[in-house]
Amino acid sequence: MVVAIVKEARADETRVALTPDAVKTLTGKGFQIAVETGAGLQAGASDADYQAAGASISTQRGELLASADILPVVNALPAADQEKLKSGSVMIGFLRPLEEPAALAAAPVAELWAWARADWATNRLSQRLTLPLEG
């Protein structure tokens, strides 16, 4: 099973979907992890950190997207990237389907499974909502 980690498209995003520690855990469980070069730099993780954790590094974003079975992301991919995902891929992240529904417009076309997580908090209560989206 291939897990691909790509650079976030938003210029102001400093997070990365998976850290090298998470990659080490997943490779230890048999997952193949492929990371786009520079994906973790804004979060303080170098390509060498990911390689040391067992990931391969690639400069070919399109190939990473096309090979991914699972694509953890912080934010939804741009539509052009979503269209490169293979049918049946799973994209997991803060996809904001209620706030930014157009961001997932390509998901049904690509027969993509998208799992969104939305958090909100009140003074005394924190609730989590997981929404499966399918086209």
Image (cartoon, rainbow, N blue to C red):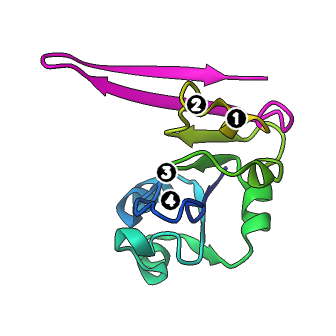
Q: Nearer the viewer, mark 2 or mark 1?
A: 1
Q: Is residue 77 above or below residue 9?
A: above
Q: Nearer the viewer, residue 96 or 36?
A: 96
Residue at the image point whose x is 49% and y is 39% from the top: 94
Separation of marks 4 and 2 at Cα, in angstroms? 22 Å
Circles 4, 2 touching at the beta carbon (< 8 Å):
no
Secondary structure category for the residue under label 3: loop
Q: Position of residue 75 (x, y in %)?
A: 54, 47
Mark 3 / mark 2, whichever is N-terminal: 3
Mark 4 / mark 1, whichever is N-terminal: 4
In magenta stretch: residue 120: yes
Secondary structure category for the residue under label 2: strand
Name which residue type carries label 2.
Trp
Q: Circle 4 is placed at which residue position? A: 27
Q: Position of residue 134 (x, y in %)?
A: 73, 23
Separation of marks 4 and 1 at Cα, in angstroms? 34 Å
Residue 115, labelled with which disc? 2
